[in-house]
């Protein structure tokens, strides 16, 4: 049977675009279907606008710091409409680049919502297309049924499209999105209350980072409510009531639902291929990203594994290389670095201390915690926290965890060292670059702790 395309990709987010372009480079005839804007969550309503808002929050802090550095600084106020207009222009520019890249790679962009109607067949509106291989890269969206009534609350998509910030708001959740927005918004004007159900935010991160994150949020003026997820949310007087345990009620004019994201699998027609998403809505794939249906692949958030843009991109390229390039390529997911863009930011690569211990490692733990030079000069309170986990038997550095200025930039580079199998002796043999914060990672000589502790 002659197909219209060799590969048809569902979803023009970062993963889908990367896969389609790589397949086209290999000579495949490729189409990509998108019902919303080209660029997906990361570019249009996620990583990119979020980081632009983080820069605004950081600059706001900079005005206060500038005084300490000798500047006369007048009153400064964040004007959300100006940020929103510039953000819209920038996102349009980036979407334009994505569209041009697809066209330049000879990938056909089909605009509309895709529905799989059978093996090799996809319907978009009134049109039907056939392809030898299908790649599902439809991403994820905010969970709206985590708490009764939460469906009426705003999501991070809504927040990033606001023209004016509310004066006060509650954020429900303690993960990436909750922490990043709490940290930024508290610096941009609103009074922020953060409700999360564990004792610390950022479940899954190293304990040191979670504790430091809570302190940093508190220092920024965020009202923390650990162990405190609302039982339900009610709309009232143009705002919301959070109904908490013990008959407590708090009202807020605005509430952000940051209780996680769910794969976008509904309405895709996966059942026509015999693919049944799991109870989180995720598509199961094997190590080669192939689903249970022949010639159907899935990458990125829709598979709900490591939900990060660079991972989706790497997965997409791996699928394209396997299908149209030089054969199979296995990815190494053990050393994926990630960052939480709060202020100061978190960055991490490798297991948490608890995970390393559970995996049977005996550990040398190196930790430091200091007030960086920039802060000390202005009598600021912000601190930098660093931790290295070293296997006590092999001397291999297993993990780097950091909260502090420039943490993502520093840890991204150290991730290369970990991928290359660096030992603590390699760190010790690296000459420091002075004066930097990063040099502390090669100057950690004293073991802070042995774990498990030998008593
Ligand atoms: P996360 O999974 O990070 O966090 C979800 C939060 O919601 C957790 O604190 C969770 O609590 C809480 N939660 C879930 N259900 C309930 C409930 N019923 N009641 C109360 N609290 C609840 O999701 P996010 O939406 O923050 O982010 C989604 C994903 O997007 C991230 O996991 C990450 O992969 C990606 N992302 C990455 C970013 C980056 O790289 N910087 C930035 C933003 C997102 P608990 O921990 O107790 O389960």
Image (cartoon, rainbow, N blue to C red):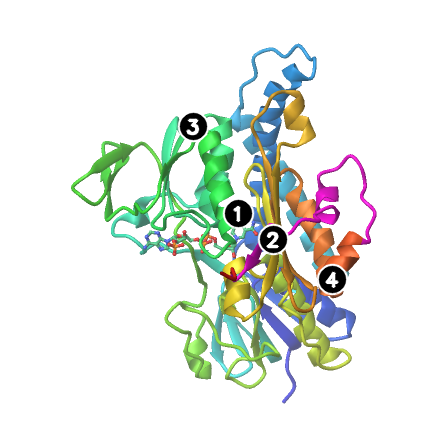
Residue 295 quadrant: bottom right
Disc 3 crowd rating (10 Å Cα; few below 14, some 14-19, many 20+) is some
Q: Position of residue 202 (x, y in %)?
A: 46, 50
Q: Earlier in the sequence, mark 3 or mark 4?
A: 3
Looking at the rendering, the stretch of residues picked out in magenta corresponds to: 429-452
Q: Which residue is mark 3?
A: 190
For the stretch drawn in magenta, what is the main secondary structure?
Answer: loop
Which quadrant is the N terminus positioned in? Answer: bottom right
Q: Which residue is mark 4?
A: 423
Q: Earlier in the sequence, mark 2 or mark 4?
A: 2
Mark 1–mark 3 Cα distance, whole angstroms, equals: 25 Å
Kindly report which numbered mark, 2 or 4, lies closer to the viewer in this rendering. 4
Mark 2–mark 3 Cα distance, whole angstroms, equals: 29 Å
Give the number of the disc on residue 209: 1
Disc 4 crowd rating (10 Å Cα; few below 14, some 14-19, many 20+) is some
Give the number of the disc on residue 348: 2
Residue ID at (45%, 64%): 263
Disc 2 crowd rating (10 Å Cα; few below 14, some 14-19, many 20+) is many
Foreground of the two, 366 or 62:
366
Please give left or right for residue 151 compared with residue 50 in the image: left
Task: Determine contact: label 2, label 4, CB under 8 Å.
Answer: no
Residue at the farthest left position: 247
Which element type, helix, strand or loop, lies under badge 3? loop
Mark 4–mark 1 Cα distance, whole angstroms, equals: 23 Å
């Amino acid at each position: 049977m002659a197909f219209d395309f060799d590969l048809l990709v569902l979803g023009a987010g970062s993963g889908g675009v990367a896969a389609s372009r790589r397949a086209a480079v290999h000579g495949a005839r490729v189409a990509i279907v998108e019902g919303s804007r080209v660029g997906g969550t990361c570019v249009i309503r996620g990583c990119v606008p979020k980081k632009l808002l983080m820069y605004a929050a950081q600059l706001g802090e900079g005005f206060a710091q500038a005084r300490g550095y000798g500047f006369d600084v007048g009153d400064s106020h964040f004007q959300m409409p100006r940020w929103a207009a510039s953000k819209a222009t920038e996102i349009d520019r980036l979407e334009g680049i994505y569209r041009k890249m697809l066209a330049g790679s000879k990938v056909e962009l089909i605009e509309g919502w895709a529905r799989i109607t059978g093996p090799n067949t996809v319907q978009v509106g009134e049109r039907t297309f056939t392809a030898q291989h299908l790649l599902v890269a439809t991403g994820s969206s905010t969970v709206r049924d985590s708490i009764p009534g939460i469906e009426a609350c705003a999501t991070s998509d809504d927040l990033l499209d606001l023209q004016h910030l509310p004066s006060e708001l509650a954020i429900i959740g303690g993960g990436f999105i909750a922490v990043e927005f709490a940290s930024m918004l508290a610096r941009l004007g609103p009074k922020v209350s953060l409700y999360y159900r564990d004792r610390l935010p950022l479940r899954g991160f190293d304990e040191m980072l979670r504790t430091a994150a809570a302190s940093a949020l508190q220092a920024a003026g965020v009202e923390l409510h650990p162990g405190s997820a609302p039982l339900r949310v009610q709309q009232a007087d143009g705002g919301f009531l959070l109904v908490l345990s013990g008959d407590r009620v708090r009202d807020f004019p605005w509430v952000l639902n940051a209780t996680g994201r769910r794969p976008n699998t509904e309405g895709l027609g996966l059942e026509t291929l015999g693919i049944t998403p799991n109870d989180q809505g995720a598509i199961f794939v094997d190590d080669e990203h192939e689903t249970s249906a022949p010639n159907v692949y899935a990458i990125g958030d829709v598979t709900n594994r490591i939900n990060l843009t660079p991972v989706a991109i790497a997965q997409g390229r791996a699928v394209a290389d396997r299908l149209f390039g030089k054969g199979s390529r296995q990815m190494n997911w053990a050393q994926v670095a990630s960052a939480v863009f709060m202020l100061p930011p978190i960055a991490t690569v490798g297991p948490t201390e608890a995970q390393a211990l559970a995996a049977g490692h005996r550990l040398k733990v190196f930790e430091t915690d200091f007030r960086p030079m920039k802060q000390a000069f202005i009598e600021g309170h912000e601190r930098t926290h660093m931790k290295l986990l070293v296997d006590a038997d092999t001397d291999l550095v297993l993990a780097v965890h950091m909260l502090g200025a420039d943490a993502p930039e520093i840890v991204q580079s150290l991730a290369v060292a970990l991928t290359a199998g660096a030992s603590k002796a390699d760190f010790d043999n690296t000459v420091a670059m002075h004066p930097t914060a990063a040099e502390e990672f090669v100057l950690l000589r004293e073991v802070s702790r042995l774990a498990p502790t030998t008593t």
